[in-house]
């Protein structure tokens, strides 16, 4: 059986062989473009970008315009004389007061909270990009696994169907030999039993294949069609285990994400501490009024001011101190999370490396197993013809050959998937590394578009 047996049987027996073939690379391209989990994380990354202009808003002035207008009735009674016989005067009238004004406020100093919030937001953006990288790796690995699972389960289904055909022929021959007295009724029963078991295995294989096709549709977004063999990607991974561990612990996106989270938590402590610092701001305002709301005798009034405000916090109930302590505990947690991420990456690399080595060796072993099982089956059949073997011996040899072929198909699938798993564990399962022909999503583009935006509610894609 050749190394591409799994792919060949899928095309010839299960899938309509369309003129256009699907390759593992094209399936990865479809997943990179259309996978909803990946697109969702891209949207989450774009949402995180908005934290930066929100933080930068602390550097910018705040403008407020006001306007007042309407109908008003006033009645004022005043004492004209303070003599024992006091005289009172009452003024009553209706007017339509109008007032317009504006206020501009600029913060000059707030304990460096704005600067620290901006740096914190930038660290959050970088952490979100690392999270996106993790999602990209997960989606591409899931796509490669789903692709190879369809090949494997389709090949196994074809093997089980062929096995049923062989068992049917074996049962026919056994019945013919029983009719001429060469074998007993027991031999016929054994052949019938093995055929029934083979049909049951076909049903199980069909269920597994349908499940793999459904998973393929979920991850990649299209139905599998005329799948071609997948190839390993060992060439993109480090050639030694120590080099793989070193690369992963230094640059795996889950590690860099944890590092940026530490940076963000460190700046969160500084932001919280900034609440204990004085705040200095300047405010300018003006008001132009016609027909006062306070007196009928005032016809026009104008007021303008430019005032500075210095606010020094003394004690606000202790909430600010609690916030600082809380931020420090969160910082300690993120540092522990960084250690956890490195340990998890290291463990994943070692495990993936071992699985890849085992998969490589398993292919050699199962190939030899298939060759030996084929020779054994041919020999048992020849010996059975001259009466040196029983029907059960033939059936057992046939089953051993089927099992060996299934093991080989599984080993071929495991070999490819293990290479992708190791590349993901190292932190290199990206379209750029694989050379996929697809435009690579660049998170920097959206960040640049919104970072210095002062106004507007439409996002860069026009919505």
Image: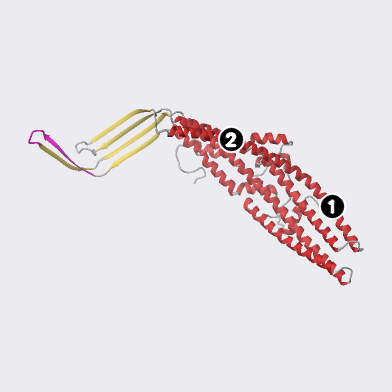
Around disc 1, counting alpha carbons within 10 Å, would you say few (fewer than 14), some (14 to 19), or many (20 or more)?
some
The reply to whether the magenta stretch includes residue 303 is no
The reply to whether the magenta stretch includes residue 79 is yes
Question: Can residue 122 be seen?
Answer: no
Q: Where is residue 299 shown, x and y percent of the image?
A: 22, 36
Badge 1 or badge 2: first in the primary sequence? 2
Q: Where is residue 273 shown, x and y percent of the image?
A: 46, 30
User: Which of 129 and 383 lies nearest the eye of the viewer?
Assistant: 383
Kindly identify the residue that appears in the image at 9 percent across and 36 percent down: 86
Q: Secondary structure at mark 2?
A: helix
Say which residue label 2 marks: 336
Q: Where is residue 326 shown, x and y percent of the image?
A: 49, 35
Kindly identify the residue that appears in the image at 53 percent across and 41 percent down: 46
Q: Is residue 271 left or right of residue 158?
A: left
User: Which of 273 and 455 lies nearest the eye of the viewer?
Assistant: 273
Say which residue label 1 marks: 371
Question: Can residue 159 be seen?
Answer: yes
Depth-wise, is mark 1 or mark 2 nearer the camera? 2
Kindly identify the residue that appears in the image at 64 percent across and 43 percent down: 137
Q: Secondary structure at mark 1?
A: helix
Q: Is residue 326 left or right of residue 101?
A: right
Q: Toward which corner of the image does residue 78 lie, by quadrant?
A: top left
Secondary structure that dominates the magenta span: strand
């Amino acid at each position: 059986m050749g190394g591409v047996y799994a792919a060949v049987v899928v095309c010839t027996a299960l899938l309509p062989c369309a003129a256009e073939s699907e390759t593992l690379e094209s399936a990865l391209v479809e997943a990179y473009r259309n996978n909803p989990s990946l697109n969702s994380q891209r949207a989450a990354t774009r949402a995180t970008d908005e934290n930066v202009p929100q933080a930068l808003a602390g550097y910018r002035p705040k403008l407020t315009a006001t306007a007042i207008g309407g109908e008003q009735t006033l009645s004022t009674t005043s004492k004209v004389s303070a003599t024992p016989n006091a005289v009172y005067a009452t003024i009553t009238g209706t007017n339509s007061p109008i007032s317009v004004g504006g206020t501009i406020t600029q913060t000059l100093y707030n304990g460096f909270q704005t600067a620290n919030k901006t740096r914190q937001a930038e660290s959050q953006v970088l952490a979100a990009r690392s999270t996106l990288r993790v999602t990209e790796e997960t989606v591409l690995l899931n796509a490669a696994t789903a692709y190879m699972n369809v090949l494997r389960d389709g090949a196994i289904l074809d093997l089980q169907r062929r096995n049923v055909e062989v068992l049917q022929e074996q049962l026919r021959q056994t019945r013919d030999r029983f009719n001429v007295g060469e074998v007993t009724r027991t031999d016929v029963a054994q052949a019938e039993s093995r055929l029934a078991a083979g049909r049951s295995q076909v049903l199980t294989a069909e269920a597994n294949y349908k499940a793999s096709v459904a998973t393929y549709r979920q991850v990649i977004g299209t139905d599998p069609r005329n799948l071609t063999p997948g190839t390993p990607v060992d060439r993109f991974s480090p050639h030694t285990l120590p080099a793989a561990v070193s690369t992963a612990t230094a640059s795996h996106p889950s590690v860099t994400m944890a590092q940026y989270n530490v940076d963000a938590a460190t700046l969160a402590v500084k932001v919280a501490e900034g609440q204990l610092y004085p705040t200095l701001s300047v405010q300018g305002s003006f008001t132009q009024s016609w027909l006062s709301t306070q007196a009928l005798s005032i016809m026009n009034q104008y007021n303008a001011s430019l005032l500075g405000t210095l606010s020094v916090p003394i004690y606000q109930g202790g909430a600010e101190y609690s916030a600082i302590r809380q931020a420090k505990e969160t910082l300690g947690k993120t540092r522990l999370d960084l250690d956890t991420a490195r340990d998890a990456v290291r463990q994943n690399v070692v495990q993936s490396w071992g699985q890849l080595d085992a998969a490589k060796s398993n292919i050699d072993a199962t190939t030899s197993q298939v060759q030996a099982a084929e020779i054994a089956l041919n020999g048992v059949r020849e010996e059975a013809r001259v009466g040196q073997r029983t029907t059960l011996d033939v059936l057992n040899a046939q089953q051993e050959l089927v099992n060996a072929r299934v093991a080989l198909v599984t080993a071929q699938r495991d070999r490819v998937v293990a290479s992708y798993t190791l590349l993901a564990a190292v932190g290199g399962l990206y379209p750029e590394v694989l050379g996929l022909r697809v435009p690579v999503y660049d998170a920097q583009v959206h960040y640049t578009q919104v970072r210095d935006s002062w106004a507007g509610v439409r996002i860069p894609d026009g919505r």
